[in-house]
Image (tube, rainbow, N blue to C red):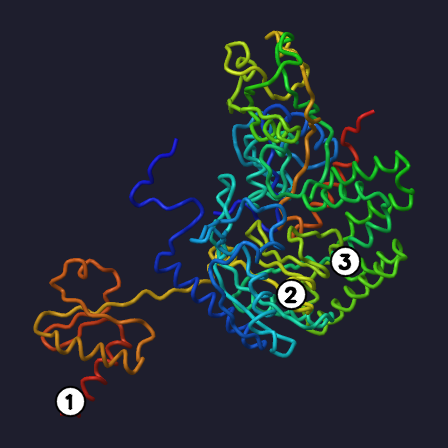
Amino acid sequence: MGTKPILYEKPQGVRDYLPQRAQWRRQLEQKLSETYRLWGYEEIITPTFEYIETFQQGLRGQEDRLFKLIDRSGKTMVLRPEMTAPIARVVSSLLKDRALPLRLFYIASIFRQQLVVTGRDAEFTQAGVEHFGDASPHADAEMIALAIDALCSVSVPGVRIALGQVAFLHAFLAEQISGDAERQEIIQSLLSKDFVMYERCVRGYLEDGKLTPASCDALLWLLRARGGVEVLTEARRFVTRADSLAALENLAAIWEMLRLHQVDQFIQVDLGLLPDFEYYTGCVWEGYAPGIGFPVVSGGRYDDMASKFGRNTPATGFMIGIERVLEVLDRTGELAVSAPKLIQFTEQDREAAIHFSTWLRRGKRLEIACSVASSSHRAAEAAPDVVGTLRGGQLFTDDLVLAGLWKSWRMESEGDQ
Amino acid sequence: MSCNLPDVLTIALSKGRIMNDTLDLMRKACVSVPAEMEDSRKFILDSPDGQLRFIVAKPTDVPTFVEYGVADLGIVGKDVLLEADRDLYELLDLGIGRCRVCVCGTPEQLGKEIHRVASKYPKIASDYFRRLGRQVEVIFLNGQVELAPLIGLADRIVDIVETGRTLRENGLEIHEEIAEITTRVVANRMSFRLKNQPINQLIDQLRQVRLVRA
């Protein structure tokens, strides 16, 4: 039975940003954009909704989380559930003649239906970048270093990045496990982060003779394959196939370049890392910060995405979750906010008040906003942010800066006459 | 305000069925557990060495606490995990709290078509029947699910069965087994990265003493 929404009710999972938070969010978005631009990335804006076909590569088995709309001809459109596919679409069509590499960034709302009452957002904001046309580890290291720089620029403390490689993972599993069904089971347990099921499967396969003891050891080792660059050396003991070794080489090269970027202390190798998105083809990574249980950033390489839209070019990228960063900064108290200040005036002083405040704005002389309100308005009298009162041609204020500005204005305006 | 401190490992424990076995196992593993744990009515207790903080919680809340990172680790039954479907790392099977999730009914109903099922586990129940391609209506009940078939509310129940005594005393029996349940250690995604070392150490300690089925 549906109940009619209460007049002021909002749908589950969307939120209002009241002035203070709205200001924080915009500051955050601005600082991130600035950092992205400094690294040579250009902003791109794409539509809020698109045909469902654009996102076919997207969420693994999560079609039921799309917000769907039907247009007049009966075609299904969706509110964008991610930004990677739309950007790959643009790069393959409108920008198909632009030379590579192409560096783009976006700040955009993302929409996903939440199935249970989990308190998760249905609309959230991602600030991300995409780098097309460079298949080398250089581009991947640039992504990670840029993400760390961006998070540091907004004062997120204690960032830690977990770095994996899906190409290695698949090659490694193919090398150890011959059966497709068994391999799928192992992949499923890694996707759901269920190490209990993983271990049970591995030991079961060994008992059934589907694994050699050496492969069993290798598979159990994978769960502990986390740490510094030494994990990559260890991994070489367990693989012989060319594609496995190449994937390890790739990670080692990325690590070396991260060292050049002087961010290797933020990185932890995790060879068992397998994110939810199906489109990743190479290195994958997630970043965490203390105080919030969800990743604040995630990224990776997806070389096949653009070719689905007709342009064969490698790509790598990441996105930072704005709401998650806000939550971290809420806790660390990093966010400063300036509420607009108010100058009151009596009726006879209206002219001076308007002229003075115009003068303040034009010269951008106050960092704070300034507005006038007649003191006959009771609401204005009650406002806590009143910094001064104009009465009988005099400004009464405790704010020394404002008092000084008033003096200068008086001198200027008297000089004019 | 935040309960989860950077240099303390916060563990959410499920009170009730598996609490005592969990504490026994932890003591056996030489984990520093507050002495007053069993008798206290406090919800938050710190270990004597100050390294661990325990939150005593309703089992169904444990996965939520851990997913949001207010607890780094949780000790909780697989039944609760299957029902909650949260994004967590499942690190270790402690082997305690062993039971089964089953479809149960009266002996007369055995083999007959199922229309309506009552359960404390609506997700486990509907997932199970959907997987088998059977269309069944699932009704959520909060407790004493065994009542449902007796009063004609449902023709089967889906519930955990430990000894089977409650079932027998109410004239019910197991018809189908859905899953085997044990107690698991789960970890938050952020904690799994940022508190890697203390978590690994605790898991290794517990691994030594966990119950392995003969």
Q: Position of residue B94 (x, y in %)?
A: 72, 32
Please name the amino acid that badge 1 sits on. Glu
From the viewer's side, name the closer residue of B120 and A387. Answer: B120
Chain at numbered mark 2: A
Badge count? 3
Please name the amino acid that badge 2 sits on. Ala
Task: Determine the residue located farthest toward the left in the rendered image.
Answer: A348
Q: Position of residue B71 (x, y in %)?
A: 58, 42
Q: Position of residue A39 (x, y in %)?
A: 59, 76
Given contact means CB atoms under 8 Å apart, are the residues at marks 1 and 3 in contact? no
In this picture, residue A90 sits left or right of residue A140: left
In this picture, residue A52 sits left or right of residue A397: right
From the viewer's side, name the closer residue of A350 and A51. Answer: A51
Q: Which mark is residue A414?
A: 1
Name the residue at 47% across, 63% down.
A47
A312 vs A203: above or below:
below
Q: Earlier in the sequence, mark 1 or mark 3?
A: 3
Query: To which residue does mark 2 refer?
Result: A306
Q: Which mark is residue A167?
A: 3
Chain at numbered mark 3: A
Whole-number angstrom distance, CA of label 1 to CA of label 2: 66 Å
Q: Of tags 3 and 2, which is closer to the observer?
A: 2
Name the residue at 71% across, 50% down.
B197
B190 vs A48: above or below:
above
Whole-number angstrom distance, CA of label 1 to CA of label 3: 75 Å
Q: Earlier in the sequence, mark 3 or mark 2?
A: 3
Picture quadrant where residue A376 is located:
bottom left
Q: Earlier in the sequence, mark 1 or mark 2?
A: 2
Whole-number angstrom distance, CA of label 3 to CA of label 2: 18 Å
A344 vs B123: above or below:
below
